[in-house]
Image: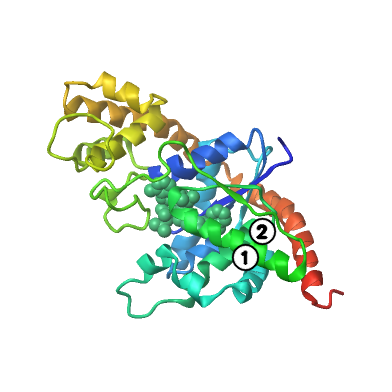
């Protein structure tokens, strides 16, 4: 249904990983054919932890180019940078004023990212209010994300409902959209943590732009349990189950088909084939990525995206302000 709207985003806080691809980007590419899609690079969210200016610029362009390289077609979906549509910051402030300390304090992402830090930025705390603004500005129906965003989607729905109750009907309550397998890809060095692009150990993740030989090496070194059975059992065999999810998402084999294929063979052949399946998915994306970066087309795509996104965002913000009692001139 072309009229159902989709919105999502990724932070330019490092190099995109296979977790970002499987958990979210793959669904972006799929949904563009059936929905009215808006995909952004959430640079305003990235600065909730310190970023070097040059690195922020480079990573923002890299994430945008990876969106295109992974198959998002700018004639079908709108791609833009969050900071270029100033309504995000403005509705973000409004959502902050509607948010309660208690509900933000309960966010596990906040607890994890602030744990053990001497000084914690306020932006990290109000991060979910800005994310709610991102989604509500476009009145999105569906939000493709990985499992770690579950709480943030709930708070978005709470804030939308709170606004509607206080000021009259305005926002739809958005639904999350998760992949069936791979909504939570775990770290290669510790299957109790999610694979994350800001992990300081590059061996813990596969970056979408890792060279094929680096991918092979990282997978061969990935931690596995001491057994030898390739069996999907997340509670007792979290490492192998994680690698099986990755394999399934990179090959379109089901988990049961993978179990059957490696029965009695141990981990060696499984890991070898897994590495080739990942390389086969990422190599063509990497080739397109290099072409896109060399072509200089990126800024035009992002400018066009900003125009399309601004139109919707401005209309929503105007209505919000009217409902809240701002003098709209
Ligand atoms: P950071 O480590 O900097 O917080 P991140 O790697 O978690 O970043 P985000 O930009 O926060 O990445 O997330 C972008 C999208 O990718 C979100 O929809 C998120 O749910 C999804 N995602 C991130 N990591 C994983 C993962 N390990 N498994 C599945 N989905 C993931
Ligand atoms: N918090 C998200 C990134 C994000 C987002 C959004 C995702 C910011 N705004 C709006 C979906 C919709 C994350 O992935 N860490």
Question: From what the image shows, is residue 158 above or below residue 68?
Answer: below
Q: Nearer the viewer, mark 1 or mark 2?
A: 1
Which quadrant of the rendered structure holds the N terminus?
Answer: top right
Can see residue 15?
A: no
Q: Identify the secondary structure beneath mark 2.
A: helix
**In the picture, residue 216 is in which quadrant?**
top left
**298 to the left or right of 194:** right
Q: Which residue is mark 2?
A: 136
Lower position in the chain sequence, tag 1 or tag 2: 2
Question: From what the image shows, is residue 79 above or below residue 86?
Answer: above
Residue drawn at x 27%, y 26% is 273
Q: Residue furthest left?
A: 226
The 10 Å Cα crowd at callout 1, few under 14, some 14 to 19, many 20 or more, is many
Where residue 137 sits: x, y (%)? Answer: 69, 59
Residue drawn at x 72%, y 71% is 166
The answer to whether marks 1 and 2 mark residues whose Cβ atoms lie closer than 8 Å is yes
Q: Which residue is mark 1?
A: 159
Q: Residue furthest front?
A: 165
Can see residue 231?
A: yes
Where residue 5 sits: x, y (%)? Answer: 68, 45
Estimate the spatial distance between the alpha carbons at disc 1 and disc 2, rounded to whole Å.
9 Å
Q: Nearer the viewer, residue 155 or 12?
A: 155
Q: Identify the secondary structure beneath mark 1.
A: helix
């Amino acid at each position: 249904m072309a009229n159902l709207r989709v919105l999502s985003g990724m932070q330019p806080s490092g190099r995109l990983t296979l977790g970002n691809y499987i958990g979210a980007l793959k669904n972006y590419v799929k949904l563009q054919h059936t929905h009215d899609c808006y995909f952004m690079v959430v640079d305003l969210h990235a600065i909730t932890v310190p970023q070097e200016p040059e690195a922020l610029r480079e990573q923002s362009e890299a994430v945008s180019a990876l969106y295109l390289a992974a198959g998002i077609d700018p004639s079908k979906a709108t791609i833009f940078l969050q900071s270029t549509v100033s309504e995000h910051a403005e509705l973000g402030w409004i959502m902050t004023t509607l948010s309660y300390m208690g509900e933000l304090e309960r966010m596990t992402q906040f607890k994890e990212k602030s744990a053990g830090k001497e000084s914690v930025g306020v932006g990290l705390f109000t991060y979910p209010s800005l994310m709610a603004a991102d989604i509500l500005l476009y009145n999105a129906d569906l939000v493709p994300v990985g499992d770690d965003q579950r709480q943030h989607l709930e708070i978005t729905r709470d804030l939308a409902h709170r606004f509607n109750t206080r000021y009259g009907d305005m926002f739809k309550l958005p639904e999350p959209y998760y992949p069936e397998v791979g909504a939570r890809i775990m770290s290669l060095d510790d299957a109790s943590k999610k694979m994350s692009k800001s992990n300081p150990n590059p061996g813990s993740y596969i970056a979408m732009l890792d060279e094929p030989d680096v991918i092979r090496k990282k997978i061969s070194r990935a931690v596995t349990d001491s057994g030898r059975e390739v069996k999907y059992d997340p509670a007792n065999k979290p490492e192998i189950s994680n690698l099986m999810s990755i394999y399934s998402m990179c090959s379109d084999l089901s988990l049961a088909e993978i179990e059957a294929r490696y029965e009695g063979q141990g981990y060696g052949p499984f890991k070898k084939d897994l590495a080739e399946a990942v390389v086969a998915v990422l190599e063509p994306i990497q080739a397109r990525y290099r072409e896109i970066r060399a072509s200089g087309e990126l800024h035009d795509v992002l400018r066009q995206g900003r125009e399309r996104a601004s139109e919707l965002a401005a209309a929503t913000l105007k209505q919000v302000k009217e409902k809240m009692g701002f003098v709209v001139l």
